[in-house]
Amino acid sequence: MATGENQDTVDMQRLVGGLDAALDDLMDRHRQRLFHYLIRLLQNESDAEDVAQESFVRVYEHRARFDPRLKFSTWLYTIATNLARDRLRWRVRHPQVSLDAENRESGANLGDALPDLSPIPSETMEANDRSAIIRDAVATLPEELRVPLVLAEYEECSQAEIAAILRCSVKAVEMRIYRARQQLRLRLEKLLPRAAA
């Protein structure tokens, strides 16, 4: 029985050979994990879904460029990471209105006018608050530190895989992850005691 990595190579060979259905097999194996990776990077489900779909479109469009000596997942994550960076840059140039933004005329926020459709049970509130604080702290890391940390901690990529995805040295990955953890530790030391209070 073929391993996932071997099957990826076989499916890419099938895709290059003109069997478009091989893309479905690749998507079935990688879509969910890629989507969760992109949510962590982009902090937005809609953007994550769009970028995940675009990543597989790029796989299809550039299928002939795939090097079968490399891991497919590394190639896929390189594509997705580059697309996510593009999306983040686009967001900076096209800021969105926050639901917390105050209406100048009424003084109320847009978020207050929307119904609360999903109340959180009180016993899970603290865990949700802690998760949100951690998510927000990760989101505030500079991109060069956030991306390798997410790949290492959430996607369980090796430092060599991360180096290939980010096109840098393994030592650079090691230092970025170290710096990201240091910055997170400092931020969370300040933030988490308040959440528990």
Image (spheres, grey):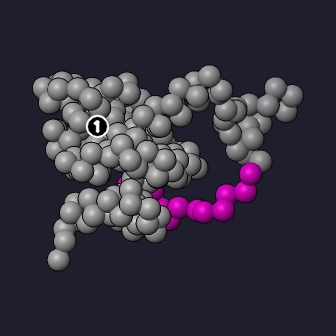
Residue at x 36%, y 64% (from the top left corner): 14
Q: In the image as oriented, which residue stretches furthest toward the left?
A: 171
Is residue 25 shown in magenta?
no
Toward which corner of the image does residue 161 lie, by quadrant?
A: top left
Would residue 172 be visible to someone looking at this image?
yes
User: Percent x, y for residue 39?
Assistant: 45, 48
Quarter of the picture holding the C terminus: top left
The amino acid type of the residue labelled 1 equals Ile
Image point (19%, 68%), residue name:
3
Q: Residue furthest right?
A: 105
Residue at the spot 16% in from the left edge and 38% down from the top edge: 159
In the rendered image, the quadrant that contains the N terminus is: bottom left
Q: Quadrant of residue 107?
A: top right
Residue linked to disc 1? 165
Residue 178 visible here: no
Q: Residue at x 59, y 29 (%)?
A: 91
Give residue 189's position: percent from left, percent from top: 27, 32
In x, y percent, where is residue 11?
33, 64
Helix, strand or loop under label 1? helix
* Furthest residue toward bottom: 1
Left or right, 93 with reference to 176 = right
Tell whether 167 sits left or right of 40: left
Vertical placement of residue 189 versus 110, above or below:
above
Taking the view exactly as shown, the residue that stands out farthest to the front is 17
Q: 26 or 62: which is nearer to us?
A: 62
| Along the line of sight, the residue nearer the viewer: 57 or 168 | 57
The residue segment tinted magenta is 114-128
Please tell me whether residue 123 belongs to the stretch shown in magenta: yes
